[in-house]
Amino acid sequence: MKRFAILLFSTLVFACASDKKDVQTVRDMAVQEVKKQMDLPEGTAFNNDNIEVTEQASDTEGVETIYVVKISVKSQDQDGNEMVKTHTLKYEKAEDNTYKLASFN
């Protein structure tokens, strides 16, 4: 019984660690994509307040999970007024653990 409990606990810990790794991977990919699409300077940094990652189940064959990433980018117009633009990126995680950018809005 103890072995079963240890095995179950180990599986749960591994699954949670894997999910966090997936979210971090998608987050990093989204930041790089936004920097590229918006032609942001190399030193541009984002913090956790600017990025929201949500996970959705997929009904599409061959796609395991869909990650929706919302990134808010603050900037100023010519008059010095602050503007906030939110971009939504959707990534599909395939069964072979590869990620593909499905959309960028």
Image (cartoon, helix red, strand yellow):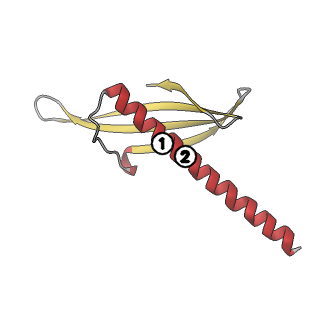
User: Please, which residue is most extreme toward the right here?
Assistant: 1
Residue in the image at 62% along x and 34% along y: 98
Disc 1 marks a residue whose amino acid type is Arg
Q: Position of residue 9 (x, y in %)?
A: 75, 66
15 sits left or right of 1 in the view: left
Disc 2 marks a residue whose amino acid type is Val
The numbered dot on residue 23 is 2
Residue in the image at 85% along x and 71% along y: 3
- Could you tell me which quadrant the N terminus lies in? bottom right
- Could you tell me which quadrant the C terminus lies in? top left
81 sits left or right of 85 in the view: left
User: Please, which residue is most extreme toward the left here?
Assistant: 79
Q: Position of residue 53 (x, y in %)?
A: 50, 43
57 sits left or right of 77 in the view: right
Q: Position of residue 37 (x, y in %)?
A: 37, 25
Please give the count of numbered marks on the rendered protein.
2
Q: Find disc 1 in the rendering and name its residue.
A: 27
